[in-house]
Image (tube, grey):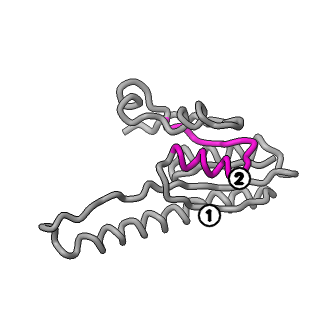
Amino acid sequence: MKVVLAVDGSSFSEAATHALASDVRPEGAEVLVLEVVEPLVYSVPPQMAPGYEPEMAERMREQLRQAEASVERAADTLRGRGFKVQTRVAEAEIRSGILNVAADYQADLIVIGSHGRKGISRFLLGSVADSVARHATCSVLIVRTSAPST
């Protein structure tokens, strides 16, 4: 079975990683741990300070470094449980990035954590997990946990 585990470095991703490790047998399972990073889209108007563009490029490099660390943490957890694991960081719109990578990987299952947003915050922010579940061509396991209190 080929599984895509979508992570984002959050406690919700950790819950999805642990759910995968405990609910799926490692024998015969191949896992691709994936984090999709939204590219920074910007244009530099002529009046912008000259240092702006390199600063944005450094910000993107930092996001990619954090994503690499996130997928490696999840991969280490799964390898410790006997899973065959690959990792990938992709630059794309998050929803379509997860779906496209899963299709290219020919995944049988996508595992994703849910932030558990409801009401107006879900309406305004959308739900990556919901969108992936609605549009995936394979099974999707959404791991729901309580949102941390702020």
Q: Secondary structure at mark 2?
A: helix
Which residue is identified by label 2? Answer: 105
Image point (55%, 65%), residue name: 68
**Picture coordinates of residue 62, whole percent (x, y):** 42, 68
- Is 29 situated left or right of 63 in this image? right
Residue closest to the eye, 75 or 37 = 37
Query: Which label was assigned to residue 72?
Result: 1
Q: Which residues are magenta?
A: 95-115
- Whichever of callouts 2 and 1 sits on the residue coming sooner in the sequence is 1
**Picture coordinates of residue 21, whole percent (x, y):** 73, 48
Image point (48%, 56%), residue name: 37
- Is 124 situated left or right of 37 in this image? left
- Is 108 situated left or right of 55 in this image? right
Quadrant holding the C terminus? top left
| Outermost residue to the right | 27
Q: Are marks 2 and 1 in contact (CB under 8 Å)?
A: no
| Outermost residue to the left | 47
Q: Which image quadrant for residue 139?
A: top right
